[in-house]
Image (cartoon, rainbow, N blue to C red):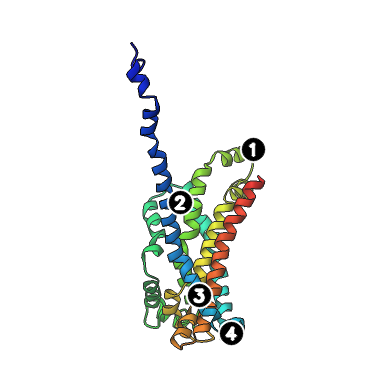
Amino acid sequence: MKRGSGPAGRASNGPAGRASNGPAPQRSVWVRRLLIAIVMGYIAVLILAPLAGLVVGAFADGISGIFRALTQPDVLAAFRLTLFISLITVVVHGVGGTMVAWVMVRQQFRGKAIINGLIDMPFAVSPVVVGYMLLLLFGRNGVLGPVLNARNIKVVFAVPGMILATLFVTLPFMIRELIPVLEAFGIQQEQAAATLGASGWQTFRRVTLPALRWGMIYGLTLTLARALGEFGAVLVVGGGVKGRTETATLYIFRALDERQYVGAFSVALVLGMFSLLLVVGADLWRQREEKKA
């Protein structure tokens, strides 16, 4: 007799047998709902609650208070400097980050593992430490200070030092977005293009670059969002001089210290919402493009 063909075997497939398996799907549903609730609560506490606080603080004096705060000359100057530094950072990392990612994936060389680890240093080092390192390098009494002073080149407590600090803290984003894309893309299509007579630049422009499009968009978006919000490194290396080296984040710091709460909340809300729209917009754009395809 085959196993399960008798009465006992048939009984295991009856109502009692089905009942023993019934609670499991129900438990899985509750576990799934619990996990979703935990995630939503986690996001609400860390992101939505601070944004709500910014909105409440910014609208303390109504829309007119926000307009007055955002149209002050020092606020406009801070926004202009922030945007200038951020755009330079995006351009530099757009080119340099793409080159680094391509070399890390396509080339094998001695010391590659060390460079791969150094790329992640900005994630581990405090921005304040970064600013202090730049002071030790480019400050008046720094290692390169005498050379720069002799040529009347000012790096620290000036915009060039702030650009260097922002470039350092935003270094990994572009590279880390592109490396997995290049690894998944492989080299078959590039080799096929080379076989058909395409030059190296033609292969990169017509074959590799289109495949990197979304990786580059996400990398540049994260780079821009991080550059807009940089505080510690630019504070140390720039000094936060009003009207000269004061970015939007440094203005927020000064406004809070001077009890100009509406101005601080308003500028912080603009930066936060702009960064959020950048990230969410890039994701929605990709979803729309994928649906079209």
The label number, if any, that marks residue 54 in the structure image? 3
Q: Residues within 10 Å of mark 3 (few under 14, many from 20)?
A: many
Q: Nearer the viewer, residue 42 or 32?
A: 32
Q: Determine the image quadrant of residue 67.
A: bottom right
Q: CA distance from mark 2 to mark 3?
A: 41 Å
Q: Secondary structure at mark 4?
A: helix
| Residue type highlighted by circle 2 | Met
Task: Give yes or no for contact between labels 2 and 3 (Cβ–Cβ under 8 Å).
Answer: no
Q: Which residue is mark 1?
A: 196
Counting residues from the start of the chain, the first of labels 1 and 4 encountered is: 4
Q: Where in the figure is residue 169, as x and y percent of width and height?
A: 44, 67
Q: Earlier in the sequence, mark 2 or mark 1?
A: 2
Report the residue marked by disc 2.
Answer: 104
Mark 2 or 1: in front is 2
Location of residue 230 in the rendering, given as x and y in whole percent from the top left corner: 47, 72
Work out whether residue 123 or residue 175 is closer to the camera in this orientation and state it: 123
Q: Amino acid at mark 4?
A: Gly
The residue carrying mark 4 is: 65
Disc 2 vs disc 3: which is toward the camera?
3
Q: CA distance from mark 2 to mark 1?
A: 26 Å
Judged left or right of residue 67, residue 262 is: left
Q: Residue at x 52, y 55 (%)?
A: 99
Residue in the picture at 52% in, 77% down: 56
Q: Determine the CA span between mark 3 and mark 4.
A: 14 Å
Would residue 245 be visible to someone looking at this image?
A: no
